[in-house]
Amino acid sequence: MSRRLLGRLLGRPTPPPSSGDDPPAVQDRLDSAALGLPDHATVRCLLPLPDGGLALGSDYGLTLWREGQLTPFPFPQGARRESRRVEAMAVFDGTLHVGTQTSFYTWPFHGEAAGRGRPRDGAGGYDDLRALFATPDRLLQGWRTHLEGGEGPPECLCFAAGWGGAVFAGTLDGALWQVDGAEVRRFERDGRGRPVRHLAFAHGALWVAAAGGLHRWDGAAWQTRGGEPYALHADPGGTLWALEAGRLWRSTDGGWPRPLPLRFARPWALGSTPGRLWIGRKGGALAVAPNALP
């Protein structure tokens, strides 16, 4: 089954194919070979590291970009392919936490990573880790059956910190929750709850990608526009970035993101390090200089 068909069945917007060379604003190109991955691998998770580096998680493994050098994540020997398929990452208390399709790893940035398998779900199967999010004082783990580290619903897919450090979570069944609080809103289309897959906080508002649109909440009122991004990212400077329709979108003033005159081949994820905006995609990742963009 193709990724595009699977995405439609799961209600997930999928990046359209694109052709042509990468735009000249690109600073760095890290192809699959450089990352130690198969050509068809997709970089689907990007996490800034405390030392200014970047963790690049894919459906085939995890690579660390630190001080301009690429190193493979030290998975335990014998780790199978499914235990290397990265689903979520977070840094908490000086340790990198990595959730994969079948395992959960911790690594204190030296030595070999420690791993354990998924816990049982109480129904004869295994639980699944969907999302990780770190605050200064806790690590939130969104499992299929429960939320660990805070009070909230199961099946959390994404998190974002908002006003006063309050943390919000989006769920598979279309709910937006405040962790340790209550449900804020439910997103539906055609009478069904639709997954809230991406959240970001920028310009004093919470941005939500769900149910075929982009939604903005200032804490009092909601606004919505059509077109659901398949990635959202607020960089440390406060700029909101989005991927939609094969293009990079940007908001610097709190208005709706505007498309930049750039197209990328099969983009999937967004992240940032000092002076760079990273775009994960099928075949690797690339970095652009935000100040050089039109």
Image (cartoon, rainbow, N blue to C red):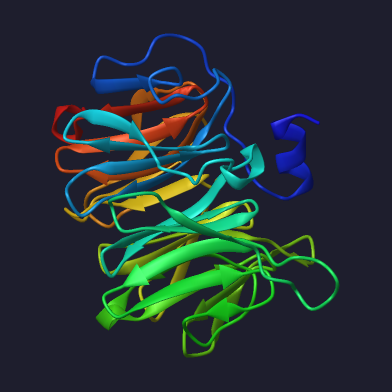
Q: Which quadrant of the figure contains the N terminus?
A: top right
The reply to whether residue 256 is in sight is no
In the image, 174: left or right of 121?
left
In the image, 173: left or right of 246?
right
Foreground of the two, 191 or 194: 194
Quarter of the rendering containing residue 140? bottom left
Q: Which quadrant of the figure contains the C terminus?
A: top left
Which residue sits furthest right?
A: 124
**Residue 14 percent across, percent down from the top left:** 62, 37
Tell me the residue at 44%/17% (across/down): 33
Foreground of the two, 100 or 215: 100
Foreground of the two, 156 or 230: 156
Tell me the residue at 55%/27% (across/down): 41
Count of marks overlaid on the render: 0
The reply to whether residue 175 is in sight is yes
Tell me the residue at 43%/55% (across/down): 89
Q: Is residue 34 above or below residue 139?
A: above
**Residue 111 percent across, percent down from the top left:** 32, 49
**Residue 113 percent across, percent down from the top left:** 42, 52
Q: Is residue 6 above or below residue 292?
A: below
In the image, 253: left or right of 102?
left
